[in-house]
Image (tube, rainbow, N blue to C red):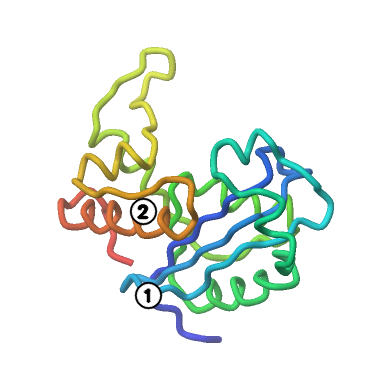
Amino acid sequence: MNERNGYIVIDFETTGLCFSTLEVLQVSVINDKGETLLHGYCRPKHTDSWEDAEAIHGISPEMVAGCPTFREGYLPKLLELIEGVSAVIAYNADFERNVLRYAYGVDPVVAFIDPMLMFAPVYGEWTDYFQDYRWQKLETAASYYNYEFKAHDALEDVKATRFVFEKMIEAGVVPIMV
């Protein structure tokens, strides 16, 4: 068994939000030092257009036309990266984990850590409806820690997520060091 250490930060931009039909259009992974380990656009195999998602992240069918699919071009390397770390960090980690689980049929045995859940009480916006602190967008968390970036680009998002996560470690918000 390989010794696991450190963490990676992952982010996907996708064709939509329905796990049974979505496909990855962009993937980025950086390590705990901020080094880019994986980054690229992906051509969907079963989807020709994604207007609603494109309006958010700006990735058009033309941008990914000549790219490999996520499953063929990126998934094996991503799983290899996950195999070697103690944890995967992702803002709204359930989404990234569920993309792997339900859209691609893989469920890596590794801790997924979600800075979004940790940041909610830091920001402190209470919601009576859920009787909990409201989850904040990555843009809000990054701004709180004075970090500027272009949201909904996978590489920019992983860099911002790592920055927010490290700031919360420094502040003692993150209960464990990974």
Q: Residue at x 46, y 62 (%)?
A: 88
Q: Residue 163 versus residue 165: which sits nearer the camera?
A: 163
> Which residue lies under the disc numbered 2?
161
Q: Residue 57 versus residue 6: which sits nearer the camera?
A: 57
Q: Residue at x 65, y 51 (%)?
A: 99
**Picture quarter with the C terminus:** bottom left
Disc with the residue nearer the chain's start (1 vs 2): 1
Q: Residue at x 73, y 52 (%)?
A: 103
**Residue 60, percent from left and from top:** 66, 48
Q: Secondary structure at mark 2?
A: helix
Q: Residue at x 62, y 41 (%)?
A: 54
Decide if residue 159 is on the left or right side of residue 152: left
Which numbered disc covers residue 138?
A: none
> Which residue lies under the disc numbered 1?
35
Question: What is the three-letter code of the residue carrying label 1?
Answer: Glu
Q: Secondary structure at mark 1?
A: loop
Question: What is the three-letter code of the residue carrying label 2?
Answer: Thr
Mark 1 to mark 2: distance in Å? Answer: 13 Å
Question: Eyeballing the image, is 28 above or below 19?
Answer: below
Decide if residue 65 is on the left or right side of residue 81: right
Q: Residue 160, located in which quarter of the rendered image?
A: bottom left
Question: Eyeballing the image, is 71 above or below 60?
Answer: below
Q: Residue 55, located in which quarter of the rendered image?
A: top right
**Residue 176, percent from left and from top:** 29, 59
**Picture quarter with the N terminus:** bottom right
Question: Eyeballing the image, is 52 above or below 84?
Answer: above
**Residue 9, percent from left and from top:** 43, 62
Question: Eyeballing the image, is 4 above or below 52?
Answer: below
